[in-house]
Image: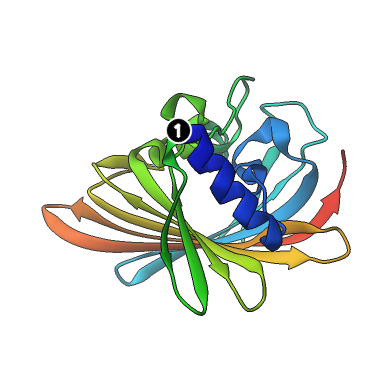
Amino acid sequence: MASDEKSKVLERLKAYNFNETTLTEHLIDTLAKYSYNTHTTTYIKDEQKIKKANYNPALKLGERWHLDSVDHRIPTEKERAAFNKNHNQDKYGASGKIADTSWHIVAEDLNYLKVSFRFEPNGLPELFSFLGKCIGYAYFNKKTKKLERAQFINEEPVRFHIFQVKDLEVNIYYSFNTAKKKYFVDKEVAELSISLLGNKVQVKEICRFSNYKKVK
């Protein structure tokens, strides 16, 4: 019964040039075929930190991510070590599988189709393990026939990077390359609430992706 629901949803989404790997490819190093650059700005209270990095799936696992700069300077060894610990997945096995029973059309109007889904927790790499405690929603524009964004909202406390988080929302924005017939991630926006010295603090992280090149 569950697989029938999944089949019906995915069949409906073929009109949007969508398949299941659209939501998983950029999460799993072993699925990636494109190199790219990232520009991440993290806002905490009145402070901000800017990190520039690049990703190359042609390199071996554990060496694909490289931190280029932090606040426009060369990263310290401590900063590189922390970045590598978070980003450089050095093991095979992560699948990014979406649970078959989780596919549902949850809302539809003249403009948008909204689909819910959930990742299987044991199939996620450590960097994205928090997604295993989130409900996911994909938003499809019915006029353009394209996926616009995926949204993740936590249902229990999670660890996001170095933060223990009670409230988290992540939005991933996509663009469709007509020539390649493929979706690419343009931007990820994470908004979260953390406790800092006993006070509730809002954190916002914006990561922009650019310079995609096929290397595999």
Residue 207 in sight in this render: no
> In the displayed structure, would residue 33 be above or below residue 48?
above
Q: Residue at 41% of width from left, 43% of height from top?
A: 161
Q: Nearer the viewer, residue 51 or 188?
A: 188
> In the displayed structure, would residue 209 be above or below residue 197?
below
Does residue 148 appear left or right of residue 100 in this picture?
right
In x, y percent, where is residue 119? 46, 37
Q: Of helix, strand and loop, which one carries label 1?
A: loop
In x, y percent, where is residue 11? 64, 50
Residue 181 picture quarter: bottom right
Instruction: Give the class, few, some or many, for how many residues have Cα within 10 Å of label 1's Cα (few <14, many ≥20).
Output: few
Q: Amino acid at mark 1?
A: Met
Q: Residue at 52% of width from left, 33% of height from top?
A: 3
Q: Which residue is mark 1?
A: 1
In the picture, the quarter occupied by the N terminus is top left
How many numbered badges does the structure rendering display? Answer: 1
Q: Residue at 43% of width from left, 35% of height from top?
A: 101
> In the displayed structure, would residue 194 be above or below residue 47?
above
Residue 121 in sight in this render: yes
In x, y percent, where is residue 183? 71, 58
In the picture, the quarter occupied by the C terminus is top right
Does residue 193 appear left or right of residue 108 in this picture?
left
Does residue 191 appear left or right of residue 37 in this picture?
left
> In the displayed structure, would residue 101 be above or below residue 193?
above
In x, y percent, where is residue 37? 71, 56
Q: Residue furthest left?
A: 198
Residue 200 picture quarter: bottom left
Q: Nearer the viewer, residue 53 or 58?
A: 58
Q: Residue at 20% of width from left, 53% of height from top?
A: 196
Q: How is the image coloured?
A: rainbow
